[in-house]
Image (spheres, coloured by chain):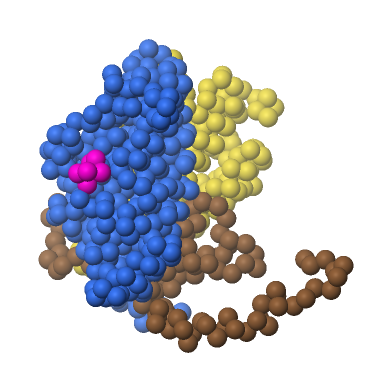
Chain colours: A blue, B brown, C yellow
């Protein structure tokens, strides 16, 4: 595949807007980039279950409890779809999971921040899922067929997450003083990490060039971030919440909300593993995996014993 | 659970990969919904219900071991699919509709 | 609907609906603790589904309980503003999750019971309850399929899994008798054909449990062990208090707030 003629042929397919399917020939680097990106995305869904899962047992009403369980369950489903999409590129889910548990794989840094109050559940739905939707709407058009199909399914389901989050935030922002305080505090803590979700500036993003060229991504990190800010600032104002950025200012000419500089030192520290919850998150995944080993063994042993019978049935 | 015998063998993993096909309406074909892992067919069926049928109505589910599927190769593109495109008589647009007849 | 009941029947029915609702609320809550921690991704999704069904059923039953009581209490008031001594769930269901085998065995023993109970409750003369039973039975049929299939796999899986699931069964056997014990409240409601006669379900329950347990190459424990009693009257284990303090913390902290 690597010779120039084939590379050119591949690029022509991409430029013509064709989807690449698992058995199609593709550059090795395309395959590797996709495995990296899709598996990071899958890990993020799985680790993302933890900060919100924390609050399932403390949800303040039965309906809220139902919605939160359904939401965290969806994230498991999204992780599952994405692992399957990665598997079409010739890698096993077990191997990908092992990379996560060994601390070799990355996942979205946002999930290394703690959920301190119920308002965090609302703000995660509104800001974090909101940011994810901006990103995923783009990825639904990705050039790799299985990734694009997984993203289309995920986008459909994510909409309920964002609405659920906004409803919680709006209810609390209009609630008793203690609730208002929790809501504003949650916005203050999650705003900047949400902006960080789009990744480094385009100029500092090592993979962006090739991902854009191959139409895995169709917009840059900074473009997506700006879009998210433009969508979110008016929502915050409508709910009576302030954004913790003194430099936030509307530019009538570009119709953009200009915003201040992200603390990139914090961004890289959290990626390196120094976020407030990095260790707990991975340890929670390791424990679930360890505690489940005997169950997986039992299921495999049972399947082996009964394989012949089920063939007859 | 105090002193349990710990397994020393390597982890069994999440089981084989299964492809899931669901039928959403009576009379409609089963369409590919996605994949999942399961140790055996019964578990694959149950998992498929939870993963691919928890929203909306699903009438029937097929689970197929992914290894049982043989797919055509992109190299088959020419000989496999192109001749069909020539056979215009297979496509409804080939046939002229008599004037005044409403096509349904 | 409840206006036609006399005072005694109304009080009995309220208590009975709490029993049904609390069983599912507490079990659903326990199951939700698994969310994100299951032995495989697919099983996380399955346990969440069962948890959602249980809590959904609890909402219907507690809402109905509040209506029967007629004092304006909602399902949330009943879930979040009662003390442990006012809860009417089976002691089995408030037990901590333990390992996956413990959770599955608890689910299996309850699913068989719930299956026959709802089957009988479809005939309840109290129409709203009969309707809940019809709808819930469909869900429980699936829960039972899930839990019994896992009992088979864990029982007839590896030596370690057999030990673990047998240990869970041995441990839980002392809690099951409570499912079938009648008190005055239930006896009065059975006469009115409102409640299902749980004592009449024991034989069928035992038959199905034995069938699956034996198929799973496990042993039914002997009956000469101490059997718990009294949870239907509010005598619980200590575990329920911790569960409730976690569940109720927010509502109790801000009783005037909407969420």
Quadrant of residue C14 in the image? top right
> Horizontally, is C234 left or right of A285 in the view?
right
Q: Residue at x 19, y 31 (%)?
A: A263
Residue at the front extreme of this rendering? A253
In the displayed structure, C153 sits above or below C109; it is below
Residue at the top extreme of this rendering? A177
Q: Residue at x 28, y 18 (%)?
A: A246
Does any portion of residue A42 appear in the rendered image?
A: no
In the displayed structure, A285 sits above or below A188; it is below
Q: Nearer the viewer, residue A70 or A223?
A: A223
> Horizontally, is C211 left or right of B100 in the view?
left
Does any portion of residue A106 appear in the rendered image?
A: yes
Horizontal and vertical percent for residue C75?
A: 50, 29
Quadrant of residue C144 in the image? bottom left
> Horizontally, is A249 left or right of B57 in the view?
left
> Horizontally, is C233 left or right of C60 in the view?
left
Q: Residue at x 80, y 73 (%)?
A: B97
User: Magenta segment: does it hold C145?
Assistant: no
Q: Nearer the viewer, residue A59 or B28?
A: B28
Q: Nearer the viewer, residue C87 or C234?
A: C87
Provide the residue span drawn in magenta: A200-205
Q: Residue at x 55, y 68 (%)?
A: B30
Horizontal and vertical percent for residue A92?
A: 26, 67
Horizontal and vertical percent for residue C34?
A: 31, 46
């Amino acid at each position: 595949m690597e010779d120039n003629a084939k590379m050119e042929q591949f690029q022509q397919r991409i430029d013509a807007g064709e989807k690449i399917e698992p058995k199609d020939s593709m550059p090795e680097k395309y395959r590797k980039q996709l495995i990296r990106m899709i598996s990071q995305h899958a890990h993020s869904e799985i680790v993302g279950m933890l900060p919100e899962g924390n609050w399932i047992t403390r949800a303040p009403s039965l309906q809220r409890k139902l919605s939160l369980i359904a939401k965290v369950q969806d994230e498991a489903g999204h992780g599952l779809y994405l692992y399957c999409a990665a598997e079409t590129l010739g890698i096993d889910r077990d191997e990908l999971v092992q990379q996560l548990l060994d601390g070799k794989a990355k996942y979205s840094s946002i999930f290394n921040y703690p959920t301190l109050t119920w308002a965090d559940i609302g703000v995660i739905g509104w800001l974090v899922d909101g940011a994810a939707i901006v990103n995923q709407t783009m990825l639904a058009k990705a050039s790799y067929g299985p990734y694009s199909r997984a993203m289309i399914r995920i986008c459909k389901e994510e909409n309920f997450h964002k609405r659920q989050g906004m409803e919680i935030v709006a209810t609390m922002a209009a609630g008793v003083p203690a609730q208002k305080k929790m809501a504003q505090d949650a916005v203050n803590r999650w705003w900047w990490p949400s902006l960080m979700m789009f990744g480094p500036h385009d100029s500092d993003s090592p993979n962006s060039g090739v991902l854009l060229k191959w139409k895995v991504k169709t917009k840059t990190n900074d473009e997506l971030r700006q879009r998210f800010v433009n969508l979110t600032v008016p929502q915050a104002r409508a709910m009576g919440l302030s954004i913790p950025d003194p430099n936030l200012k509307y530019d009538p000419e570009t119709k953009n909300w200009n915003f201040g500089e992200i603390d990139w030192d914090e961004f890289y520290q959290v990626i390196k593993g120094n976020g407030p919850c990095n260790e707990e998150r991975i340890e929670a995944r390791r424990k679930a995996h360890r505690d489940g080993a005997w169950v997986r063994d039992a299921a495999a042993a049972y399947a082996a014993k009964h394989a012949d019978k089920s063939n007859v049935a | 659970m105090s002193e349990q015998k710990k397994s020393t063998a390597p982890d069994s993993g999440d089981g084989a990969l299964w492809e899931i096909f669901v039928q959403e309406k009576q009379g409609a074909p089963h369409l590919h919904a996605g994949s999942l892992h399961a140790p055996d067919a019964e578990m694959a069926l149950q998992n498929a219900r939870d993963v691919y049928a928890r929203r909306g109505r699903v009438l029937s589910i097929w689970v197929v071991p992914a290894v049982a599927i043989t797919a055509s190769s992109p190299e088959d593109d020419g000989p496999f699919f192109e001749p069909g495109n020539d056979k215009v008589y297979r496509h409804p647009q080939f046939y002229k509709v008599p004037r005044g007849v409403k096509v349904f | 609907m409840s206006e036609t009941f006399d005072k005694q029947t109304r009080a009995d029915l309220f208590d009975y609906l709490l029993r049904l609702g609390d069983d599912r609320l507490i079990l659903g809550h326990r199951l939700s603790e698994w969310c994100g921690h299951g032995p495989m991704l697919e099983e996380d999704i399955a346990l969440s589904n069962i948890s959602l069904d249980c809590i959904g059923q609890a909402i219907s039953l507690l809402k109905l309980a509040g209506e029967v009581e007629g004092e304006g209490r909602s399902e949330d008031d009943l879930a979040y503003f009662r003390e442990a001594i006012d809860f009417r769930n089976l002691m089995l269901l408030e037990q901590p999750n333990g390992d996956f085998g413990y959770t599955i065995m608890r689910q299996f023993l309850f699913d068989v019971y719930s299956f026959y109970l709802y089957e009988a409750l479809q005939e309840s003369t109290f129409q709203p309850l009969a309707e809940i039973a019809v709808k819930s039975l469909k869900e429980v049929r699936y829960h039972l399929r899930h839990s019994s299939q896992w009992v088979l796999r864990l029982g007839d899986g590896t030596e370690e899994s057999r030990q673990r699931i047998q240990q869970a069964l041995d441990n839980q056997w002392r809690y099951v008798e409570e499912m079938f014990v009648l008190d005055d409240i239930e006896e009065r409601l059975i006469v009115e054909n409102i409640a299902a006669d749980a004592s009449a379900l024991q034989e069928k329950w035992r038959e199905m449990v034995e069938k699956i347990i034996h198929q799973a190459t496990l042993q039914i424990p002997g009956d000469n062990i101490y059997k718990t009693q009294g949870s239907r009257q509010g005598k619980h284990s200590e575990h329920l208090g911790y569960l409730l303090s976690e569940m109720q913390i927010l509502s109790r902290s801000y009783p005037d707030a909407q969420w």
